[in-house]
Image (cartoon, rainbow, N blue to C red):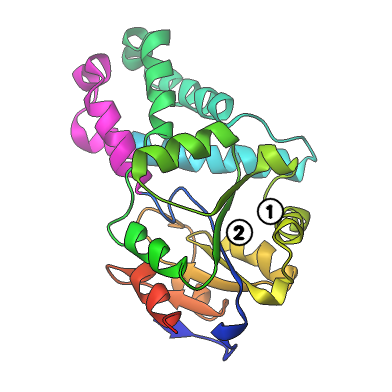
Amino acid sequence: MASRSNFDLADIQAVVFDLMGTCTDWKTAITSAMSSCLPLCQVLPPDERATLAQQWRSGFFAEIHDRFSKGLPGEDIDITHRRVLDQLVAQNPTLGASLQDEHREQLVRSWHDQVAWPDSIAAIEQLKKSCMVVVLANGTTRLQLDIVRSSGLGFHMLFSSQLLGLTKPSPDIYLKALSLLGVEPAQSLMVAAHAYDLRAAKTTGMRTAYIRRHTEDDHEDMALVKNEFDLFLDGERPLHSLASLFRR
């Protein structure tokens, strides 16, 4: 664990989490769904399925960042996931011919069924003893409800981009969530495994904690990220380390 600043955790009233990648191991869920899809398994061996899953995730981020940069409204993540999947499948004619619409829809649906990282559930329960613990993430409310139900994660509140009518990384989405919670930015801690998310939160005055997950931010220079935010937590159980800081 690395700490860049000496802010007082006693001032934190709300811990605000990103969801997929930060609290859930999406890659295990998606590769498992791919392994259950017979037409896909007949074409791609396990290592290529893992690569396809990572490309799907990267393509999703590229899409939402592109929409945001163009000032376009956010869209249902299921639609984004389907479009990116279709683009990737089109690059493999054999896979494209065998993967029918029903199979693609099943794969898109698999993003709703997530597995919590081993440290997530206990850490969130511990944090709830000290603070309001909420989700703030891009996507639909239904997606978030499905994820927390399937993963066993328990939060006080779920703020989706659909619910707030704004999209990360707009600073306004963080400020709107905090306004609804009745806390000032300096009284909140944004927790995410994505540097772009924390950079946006930081501009509002929120405190920031970077959670290092091996599935996320492979394009970022971690030597720089370590010095960019208030907290940098890595290792096998980074959220456990975070929760231990809040034991009062």
Q: Quadrant of residue 161?
A: top right
Res. 194 in view: yes
Q: Please provide percent x and percent y for residue 27.
A: 33, 43
Give the quarter of the figure containing the N terminus. Answer: bottom left
Report which residue position mark 2 lands on.
197
Which residue is at a point 30% across and 72% down the rendered structure image?
A: 235
Q: Amino acid at mark 1?
A: Pro
Q: Secondary structure at mark 1?
A: loop
Is-magenta flag for residue 34?
Answer: yes
Is-magenta flag for residue 55?
Answer: no
Q: Quadrant of residue 12?
A: bottom right
Which class describes the residues within 10 Å of circle 1: few (<14), some (14-19), or many (20+)? many
Q: Please provide percent x and percent y for residue 189.
A: 59, 71
Report which residue position mark 1 lands on.
169
Which residue is at a point 60% across and 65% down the rendered structure image?
A: 198
First reached walking from the N terminus: tag 1 or tag 2: 1
Observer-nearest residue: 219 or 10?
A: 10
Q: How many marks?
A: 2
Q: Main secondary structure of the magenta part?
A: helix
Are circles 1 and 2 on residues that touch, CB within 8 Å? yes
Residue 66 is left or right of residue 62, and the answer is right
State the CA–CA distance, disc 1 to disc 2: 6 Å
What span is colored magenta in the figure? 25-51
Q: Please provide percent x and percent y for residue 22.
A: 44, 56
Q: Quadrant of residue 212?
A: bottom left
Residue 94 is left or right of residue 232, and the answer is left
